Amino acid sequence: MTTIKVGVYVDAENVLRCGGHGLRYDTLLDFILSQPGAVLQRACIYQGVDKERIQAEDLYRTSVHGFQRALRDGGWKIVEKPVRWFLQEDGSKIYKANADIDMTVDILTQARNLDRIILVTGDGDFTALVEELQNQGKRVEVLSFLNTALELQQSADQSYSGYLVPGLLPVRDAPAVPWGKPGSRIRGSCVHWDAAGHYGFIRLRLESGGSLHLSDSRHPDSPYQSAFVAGSEIPKTFPQQYLAQRQAILEFDLFESDRDPDSFVARNCTVITSRYAA
């Protein structure tokens, strides 16, 4: 089997601002390394740290250091970016910890030893970097959550929604049933909607691994499955015409079909986001 050297780079501030709070970094690595031949070469997290709070607040210092220690134990390198505070016209303060330059320089420097590069960010400022890496013959993929720049998605060789990776983010009020088992609460995206019949099919992943480019769940080697969803299970406030465009990510309870034990149905659906365009 051909070895594929992989580097993954996480823009932690973007992840936190755009729906990725609670991201499980061990699951992220499992997902990335589940691809055939993948060997991890670099795993870097760019994290904003408020140095003044580190000195002044015991709880903040303990939280930051504990988080970093756990990540280092899991094989991640932490690159700290100092938080800078800015005063707005209305008198309020906002902070920024921009990792763009550091990430870009590191990736360009390290790219010669990599075959596949995964950017965990939705920041459109990385679009030029993606295109430069592709010109060097690298495969570049993007994993993100909310507010992903469309130009970044379109430039990447493949774009993933982190909401759809099994176990990557916690599911609120989920039953004590593992992701993908009947009775579990999971996420997926609608790939077909019959407006006249008032039903559709949700594409989902029961577990990490498999050939991700085989997106048709009917293919025998596809890691994807389908779940039937009735229109009555979709929130009434959500315009169902957007479902067919796969702009909505649904969270739902997964059950085996009463008619076919090898098929699934989705019930009690909620819409997580309709901004992500797959």
Image (cartoon, rainbow, N blue to C red):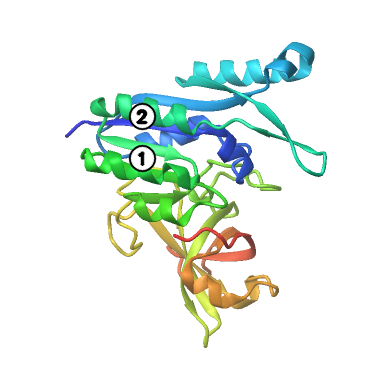
Secondary structure of the residue carrying tag 1 is: helix
Image check: 237 left or right of 242?
right
Residue ID for mark 1: 129
Residue at 39% across / 46% down in the picture?
127
Image check: 196 left or right of 38?
right
Split into 4 quadrants, where in the image is the C terminus? bottom left
Q: Which of the pair 41/261 is nearer the observer?
A: 41
- Kindly tell me whether residue 84 is visible in this rendering: yes
Q: Position of residue 195 (x, y in %)?
A: 52, 83
User: Image quadrant of residue 251?
Assistant: bottom right
Q: Sort mark 1 into few (<14), some (14-19) or many (20+) by Cα contacts within 10 Å.
A: many
Residue 87 tag number = none
Image check: 164 left or right of 154?
right
Q: CA distance from mark 1 to mark 2?
A: 9 Å
Q: Position of residue 126 (x, y in %)?
A: 42, 42
Are the residues at dot 1 and dot 2 in contact (C-beta closer than 8 Å)? yes
Residue ID for mark 2: 107
